[in-house]
Image: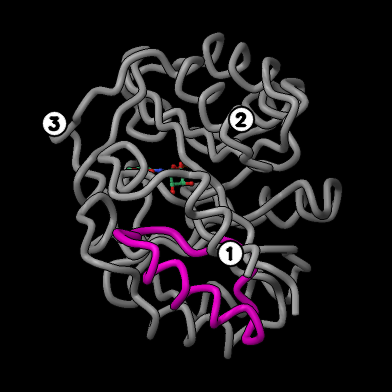
Amino acid sequence: MSKLELLPAVDVRDGQAVRLVHGESGTETSYGSPLEAALAWQRSGAEWLHLVDLDAAFGTGDNRELIAEVARAMDIKVELSGGIRDDASLAAALATGCTRVNLGTAALETPEWVAKVIAEHGDQIAVGLDVRGTTLRGRGWTRDGGDLYETLARLDSEGCARYVVTDIAKDGTLQGPNLELLRGVCAATDKPVVASGGVSSLDDLRAIAALVPEGVEGAIVGKALYAKAFTLEEALAVVAG
Ligand SMILES: O=C(O)c1ccccc1N[C@@H]1O[C@H](COP(=O)(O)O)[C@@H](O)[C@H]1O
C-alpha cells in the first residue's frame, strides 16, 4: 500500500507565515518568516511544501515575490495556492518551479479557463475543493460557488488530475479531519485526493492514512505543527508505517 504523503503548510499573509481559524480574515496567528518556516519543514524531512498566498486568495494584495523566493529555495516538491486565476498568475506560479498549483476560485468562476489549463498542464494543475457542508466557497472562502459533487463531476470529465479537499469548518481548529467528506469525495472520483483541515494529532493522521486505499494520497498539516501538537518527524514516522 502507498504511504500517505504529508504536506506541511506555509500560508503567507502580509509577508508573515500565519494560521487562520476557519480561513477567516482577522483570525491570524503569526509564526514569523515564511522562508524560515519552509526551510524548517524541509530540514525535518518534508517531501512536500503546501505554500499559500493568502492575500492573493482574499484579494488584499499579494506576496508574489516572497512566495517565489520561498518556492525557489526549496529542494522539495511545492504545491502553490492562492490567487492563481488567469494566464498571468498561472505563468508566474509555474515559473517558480513549483511541482503543481492548486486552483480554487477559478474552478468556480472561470470553468472554461480551468478546463483549458487542465488540458495544457495536466498533472501540474490540482483543484482545491474548499467546502462548507457540500457547498464550495471561493474568493477567500467568502462566497458560495456551487455544489461540491456537481463541480467534481465536471472537473473529472475535463481530466482534472487531483483534488485538494478542505473542510472550512475544520480548518485551523485542531478538531480532527472530516473523514466522511473525504470518503464521499473518494467515492465520487478515481483521482487522488489530498486532505486538508482539522488535523490535530498523530491519530488523525493514522485515520487519514487508513483512507489511502480509498483514494486519499496526502494530508496537509498546518496548525498542529505550528502549535507543536506533534513534530513533523513524528508525523513522517507515523505515515511511513
Ligand atoms: O488556506 C487557507 O487557510 C485559506 C483561507 C482562505 C482562503 C484560501 C485559503 N487557502 C487556499 O487558497 C487557495 C484558493 O485560492 P484562490 O481561490 O484560487 O485564489 C486554495 O488552495 C485554498 O485552500
Residue, disc 3 = 26
Foreground of the two, 15 or 38: 38
From this view, report whether residue 214 is shown above or below residue 34.
Answer: below
Label disc, if present, on residue 239 of the rendered structure: 1
Left or right: 14 with respect to 4? left
Q: Quadrant for residue 203, please give it.
A: bottom left
Label 1 Cα crowd, 10 Å radius (few <14 / some 14-19 / many 20+):
some
Q: Secondary structure at mark 3?
A: loop
* Segment tinted magenta in the rendering: 195-218
Marker count (numbered)? 3
Q: From mark 2 to mark 3, how far is it between C-alphas?
A: 28 Å
Foreground of the two, 89 or 188: 188
Q: Which residue type carries mark 3?
A: Gly
- Identify the residue at horizontal 52%, vertical 45% (top origin): 233
- Identify the residue at horizontal 51%, vertical 15% (top origin): 35
Q: Quadrant of ligand 1?
A: top left
| Residue 137 screen position, x and y as percent | 34, 57
Q: Which residue type carries mark 2?
A: Gln
Nearer mark to the viewer, of 2 and 3: 2
Q: From mark 3 to mark 1, how far is it between C-alphas?
A: 33 Å
Residue, disc 2 = 42
